[in-house]
Image: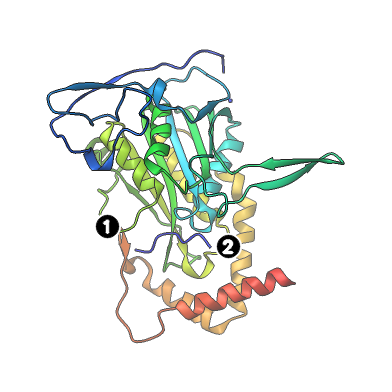
């Protein structure tokens, strides 16, 4: 499987809780270690033999900058990160659409200073008025909203460049303070699928209750992971239910933002949290997306043939239990050259 290749209610203090861990090993669990020596705390399930340690979420969010403190009832956290986990902007577009459709209000930001390589993810300059310039820093932000099915916290921003474990502590501290019922991460990946077919959504969880309730799969993927994998693992270690949804994006259209992938993620997320998904919000974008890709295909006979072959393979090429895409072995071109042609087409379009 190929992963994505990145080319605000009342002013009431949020509920808190402490977690007491029963530790049976001197080794750090799954790589988690205390990261702030100023505070006597460790991550849940980390400590020394025969000891009970309390992880205080109020001291774990040193980098969270609160903008409001609403009262929320066991919210679902829906998170997406731009970058490696976000092929064709499918996941980030989904969360951005939910923020707008649900009229979500600012909750908090995670200070980017310790987590971002600003030489790779650069801040932007924006003009305000005739002579005022503002620096806009890339950061992970959170919003809150109430839907018919559940209160939600929406999290969106760039995948951190540095100190992933410390960053993940910030996310989990918010989940613990608000007694989150679930952390739902969204992602999008590149796959050999046709744009003309329905977007496939793969749902995974390591929680047996979640798997049975929402018809999910146990994760089978092995290999490099993004921040989504780290957040999900931390949720498991902290006994917070976690579900991950992935949308497939056609390899030959991976440079085009995909509202189809975003819509599919929105629909499945709505089913899981029990609220009507705002599918109409992206209707016009989906139409334009299909038209743009069809124009690209009409101008390239080889690409048209490649798409036709993908359409013929259909579901036979997809193994949901393995969470990967398998294809018949062939000595023919695997389509990588076609992807190069598509990228050149997009560059030419930008130049016009």
Query: Where, quadrant-wise, is the N terminus in this rendering?
Result: bottom left
Label 2 SS: loop
Q: Quadrant of residue 291?
A: bottom right
**43 is higher (above) or lower (below) than 216:** above
* Nearer-the-camera pick, 316 or 44: 44
Numbered circle sitting on residue 222? 1
What separation in Å lies between label 1 and label 2 (alpha carbons)? 27 Å
Residue lying at 56% horizontally and 21% vertically, measured from the top left: 68
Residue 334 appears in the picture as rendered: yes
Q: Quadrant of the C terminus?
A: bottom right
Q: Position of residue 304 (x, y in %)?
A: 53, 79
User: 217 or 224: nearer the eye?
Assistant: 224
Q: Residue at x 43, y 67 (%)?
A: 193
> What residue appears at the point 64 percent right and 60 percent down from the top-left corner?
288
45 left or right of 234? left
Residue at the extreme bottom: 331
Please report contact status of discs 1 and 2: CB closer than 8 Å, yes or no.
no
Residue 179 visible in rendering: no
Its colouring scheme is: rainbow
**10 Å neighbourhood of mark 2: few (<14), some, or many (≥20)?**
some
Residue 105 left/right relative to 91: right
Tell which residue pokes out farthest to the right in this image.
130
Foreground tag (1 vs 2)? 1
Residue 272 at x, y percent in the picture: 39, 37
Residue on which the image places disc 2: 256
Image point (56%, 74%), residue name: 342
Within 10 Å of disc 1 (Cα), the crowding (few <14, some 14-19, many 20+) is few
Residue lying at the far top in this picture: please name it.
12
Across and down, in percent, residue 201 comes to 40, 53
Element class at badge 1 = loop
- Residue 236 marker: none
Left or right, 223 with reference to 263: left
């Amino acid at each position: 499987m190929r992963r994505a290749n990145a080319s605000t209610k009342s002013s009431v203090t949020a509920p808190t809780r402490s977690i007491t861990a029963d530790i049976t090993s001197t080794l750090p669990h799954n790589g988690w270690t205390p990261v702030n020596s100023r505070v006597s705390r460790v991550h849940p399930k980390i400590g020394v033999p025969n000891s009970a340690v309390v992880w205080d979420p109020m001291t774990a969010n040193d980098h969270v900058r609160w903008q409001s403190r609403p009262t929320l009832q066991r919210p679902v956290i829906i998170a997406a990160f731009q970058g490696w986990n976000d092929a064709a902007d499918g996941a980030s577009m989904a969360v951005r659409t939910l923020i707008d459709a649900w009229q979500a209000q600012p909750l908090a930001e995670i200070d980017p200073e310790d987590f971002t390589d600003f030489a790779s993810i650069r801040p932007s300059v924006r003009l305000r008025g005739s002579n005022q310039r503002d620096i806009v820093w890339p950061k992970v932000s959170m919003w809150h909203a109430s839907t018919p099915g559940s209160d939600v916290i929406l999290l969106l921003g760039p995948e951190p460049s540095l100190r992933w474990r410390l960053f993940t502590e910030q996310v989990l501290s918010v989940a613990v303070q608000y007694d989150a019922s679930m952390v739902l991460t969204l992602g999008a990946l590149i796959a050999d699928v046709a744009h003309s077919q329905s977007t496939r959504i793969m749902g995974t969880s390591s929680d047996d209750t979640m798997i049975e309730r929402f018809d999910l799969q146990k994760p089978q993927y092995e290999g490099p992971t993004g921040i989504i994998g780290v957040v999900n693992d931390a949720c498991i270690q902290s006994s917070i239910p976690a579900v991950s949804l992935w949308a497939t994006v056609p390899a030959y259209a991976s440079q085009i933002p995909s509202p189809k992938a975003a819509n599919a993620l929105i629909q499945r997320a709505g089913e899981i949290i029990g609220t009507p998904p705002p599918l109409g919000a992206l209707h016009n974008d989906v139409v334009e997306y299909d038209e743009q890709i069809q124009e690209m295909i009409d101008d390239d006979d080889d690409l048209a043939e490649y798409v036709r072959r993908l359409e013929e393979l259909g579901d036979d090429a997809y193994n949901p239990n393995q969470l990967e895409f398998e294809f018949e072995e062939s000595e023919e071109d695997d389509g990588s050259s076609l992807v190069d042609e598509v990228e050149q087409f997009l560059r030419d379009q930008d130049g016009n």
